Image (cartoon, rainbow, N blue to C red):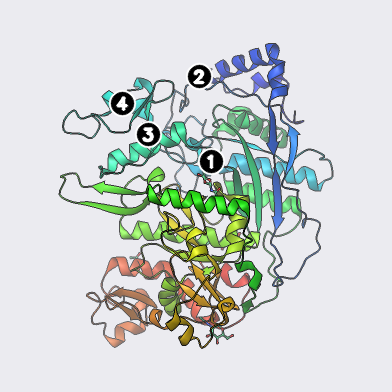
């Protein structure tokens, strides 16, 4: 048992007085504690915690500070936390007496047990982050002060603390079965296909995507019911903090209001502020960035090392494109083939039917996390945040990745996602995809709270690399090897593995004047690269973050689509139907004027949010860069 866990007597002291459900839980807990010590022993759980300072990759200088240590990722520990009885609690229950929210600013968040009304409307992910980061801070502080011989923390997890499931709230009391739920968003009583009765939790659950078009509302309910009851817990939680990544394991399913994290948090805060009271702490605004600052203080260093050498190129070992043919690989190929025959895809999008039934379409949202179809601006925002976090994840953990061909067109102009791009793809060498699949599959990337408030699921297809390995689109059902999904919107980017080409098309070989198969690599989408025109990669900025691009841009990706024009003064692509004429004198002061910004508020907004990133991009293009170059970009 960790030292800061209070004895059970003390514990009741920290139970907020107005939370009777909490007390009920404690009682149950104590009962177990008394009568079932055997349960403790049986709860042998794995725990792992890696704290990794950026991989050097030959690019960064190796700093020798004490914090540059790494935990072994695999060890066992006796974890004496109790398996919780889900039924002992009412989920999503919060305080019952509410007060007006006394604070003005949108920048504030509160503990989920604070008695303020606004907390009930939706999930504020910043408060979840605060609890988790505080545990990490506490661990790091103990480790660096030498007073810690304990294993790193492992976390309990419930999707409802990470994804807003409040849409299910009205259903939680009634627990409707599939027959009754069929009426939701319907015009007549038709049974809802593939619904499963599930009386213990929500009443019903869907464990599969819909294969026929449904309304947005139903699609949202479907995904949420899956997350609420059936979705597996993520394997690991990866907390990004500057250049660091704290990789922690998840041990059991329990939400914040079921577990002891809130109590422990309150107890530690009371210890840190002896003059305070529990009531005061519950009512004080919190900020996850404070915990990040605390980690930095504990480590006695900035979370970013600005003194790393600037560099222009990234070398990639030719060997990283090959994977050994093992027995497991052969088995994987067979399974992939069978899955392809049954159209058993790993990734599914939503098929949306409009309210009036006039149109249906497949949209690029992962079915499990879909809420609603976003407008272009919000979809772009979501894509931007995934790209940002994915790139930071790769940089911090030393994973090599680069922009796929299609994204180079727009990148080449302003370092941004083009307005015509629906999905962004990143390519990675086979060995890096394998590393993600083995170490980080089905893990959540949690953004640096200084840079955002999202979390992103890494999901690698069980048949990754099969299409590439055989250069055969029929070798596996999914063209993409992996997805990084924004769990708050369902928007995703795709990961594409690159592997030695088994054979090469004649004209491609002729174009590159080499018949040597060993000089070519291929993706599962059938794109070939001649290694000398791919490597070494160039370092650059993409969406304001450090990224890599291939050495050359294939010719067919140099020209932007004709539907868009590049406006030099805005450093943006705009719809060619808009902004046909901007007077020269307006261009000089376009920064301030509506007319200069194509007399279009959306374009103006777009310009305002991207101007620092595009300016920096053009400045550094072709120059060596380091992390310092991304820090003054305010996206
Ligand atoms: C990744 O995790 C998901 C969810 O557990 C699983 O379905 C998938 O097969 C895994 N992929 C790999 C490569 O193991
Ligand atoms: C990469 O850098 C080299 C010079 O080091 C340059 O010739 C090449 O054009 C760059 N490639 C891209 C795609 O910018
Ligand atoms: C863009 O920024 C300018 C000046 O900073 C501001 O006056 C203008 O209202 C902003 N435009 C939009 C659409 O937000
Ligand atoms: C866009 C943004 O907020 N970037 C910030 C991300 O966090 C680092 C520090 O951790 C800041 O320097 C950046 O300005």
Give the number of the disc on residue 127: 1
Q: Residue at x 43, y 29 (%)?
A: 99
Q: Quick check: 534 left or right of 556?
A: right
Question: In the rendered view, would you say 257 is above or below 511?
Answer: above
Residue at image mark 2: 87
Dot 2 lies on which element?
helix
Q: CA distance from mark 4 to mark 1?
A: 34 Å
Mark 2–mark 4 contact, CB under 8 Å? Answer: no
Give the number of the disc on residue 428: none
Q: Return the disc, 2 or 4, that comes first in the chain's sequence.
A: 2
Mark 1–mark 2 contact, CB under 8 Å? Answer: no
Residue at image mark 3: 206
Q: CA distance from mark 3 to mark 4?
A: 10 Å
Give the number of the disc on residue 178: 4
> Which circle, 4 or 1, is nearer the viewer?
4
Quarter that holds the N terminus: top right
Q: Return the disc, 3 or 1, that comes first in the chain's sequence.
A: 1
Q: CA distance from mark 2 to mark 4?
A: 21 Å
Q: Nearer the viewer, residue 61 or 361?
A: 361
Question: In the rendered view, would you say 229 is above or below 376?
Answer: above
Category of crowding for the residue at label 4, using alpha-carbon neighbours closer than 10 angstroms: few (below 14), some (14–19), many (at least 20): many
Q: Position of residue 234 (x, y in %)?
A: 55, 42
In the image, is the residue at mark 4 within 8 Å of ligand 1 by its beta carbon?
A: no
């Amino acid at each position: 048992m960790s030292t800061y866990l209070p004895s059970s007597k003390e514990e009741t002291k920290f139970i907020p007085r107005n939370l009777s459900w909490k007390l009920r839980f404690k009682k149950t807990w104590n009962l177990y504690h008394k009568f079932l010590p055997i349960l403790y022993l049986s709860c042998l759980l794995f725990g792992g915690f890696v704290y990794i300072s950026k991989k050097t990759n030959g690019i960064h200088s190796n700093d020798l500070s004490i914090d540059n240590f790494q935990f072994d990722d695999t060890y066992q520990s006796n974890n004496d936390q109790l398996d919780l009885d889900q039924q002992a609690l009412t989920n999503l229950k919060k305080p019952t007496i509410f007060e007006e929210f006394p604070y003005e600013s949108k920048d504030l968040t509160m503990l989920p047990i604070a008695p303020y009304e606004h907390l009930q409307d939706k999930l504020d992910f910043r408060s979840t982050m605060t609890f988790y980061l505080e545990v990490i801070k506490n661990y790091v502080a103990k480790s660096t002060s030498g007073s810690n011989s304990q294993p790193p923390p492992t976390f309990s997890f419930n999707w409802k603390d990470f994804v807003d499931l409040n849409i299910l709230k009205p259903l939680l009391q009634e627990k409707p079965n599939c027959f009754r739920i069929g009426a939701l968003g319907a015009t007549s009583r038709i049974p809802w296909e593939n619904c499963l009765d599930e009386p213990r939790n929500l009443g019903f659950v869907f464990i599969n995507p819909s294969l026929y078009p449904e309304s947005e509302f139903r699609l949202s309910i479907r995904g949420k019911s899956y997350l609420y009851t059936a979705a597996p817990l993520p394997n690991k939680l990866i907390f990004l903090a500057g250049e660091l990544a704290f990789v922690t394991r998840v041990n059991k399913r329990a939400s914040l209001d079921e577990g002891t994290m809130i109590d422990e948090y309150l107890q530690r805060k009371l210890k840190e502020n002896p003059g305070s009271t529990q009531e005061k702490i519950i009512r004080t605004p919190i900020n996850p960035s404070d915990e990040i600052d605390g980690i930095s203080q504990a480590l006695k260093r900035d979370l970013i090392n600005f003194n790393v050498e600037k560099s222009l190129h990234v070398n990639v070992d030719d060997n990283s494109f090959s994977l050994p043919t093992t027995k497991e690989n052969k088995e994987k190929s067979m399974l992939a083939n069978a899955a392809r025959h049954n159209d058993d895809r790993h990734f599914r999008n939503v098929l949306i039917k409009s309210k009036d039934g006039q149109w249906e379409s497949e949209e690029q949202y992962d079915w499990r996390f879909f809420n609603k179809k976003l407008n272009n601006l919000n979809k772009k925002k979501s894509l931007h945040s995934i790209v940002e976090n994915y790139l930071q994840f790769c940089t911090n953990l030393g994973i090599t990745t680069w922009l796929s061909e299609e994204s180079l067109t727009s990148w080449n102009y302003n370092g941004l996602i083009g307005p015509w791009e629906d999905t962004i793809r990143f390519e990675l060498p086979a060995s890096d995809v394998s590393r993600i699949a083995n170490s980080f599959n089905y893990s959540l990337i949690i953004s640096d709270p200084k840079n955002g408030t999202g979390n992103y699921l890494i999901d690698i297809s069980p048949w990754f690399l099969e299409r590439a390995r055989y250069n055969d689109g029929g070798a596996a059902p999914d063209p993409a090897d992996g997805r990084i999904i924004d769990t708050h919107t369902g928007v995703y980017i795709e990961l594409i593995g690159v592997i030695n080409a088994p054979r090469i098309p004649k004209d491609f070989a002729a174009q590159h004047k080499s018949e040597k198969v060993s000089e070519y690599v291929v993706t599962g989408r059938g794109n070939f690269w001649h290694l000398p025109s791919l490597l070494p990669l160039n370092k650059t900025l993409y969406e304001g973050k450090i990224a890599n691009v291939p050495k050359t841009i294939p010719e067919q990706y140099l020209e932007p689509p004709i539907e868009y024009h590049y406006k030099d003064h805005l450093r943006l692509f705009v719809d060619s139907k808009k902004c046909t004429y901007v007077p020269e004198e307006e261009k000089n002061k376009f920064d301030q004027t509506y007319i200069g910004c194509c007399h279009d508020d959306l374009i103006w907004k777009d310009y305002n949010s991207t101007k620092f990133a595009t300016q920096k991009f053009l400045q550094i293009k072709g120059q060596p860069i380091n992390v310092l170059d991304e820090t003054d970009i305010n996206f």
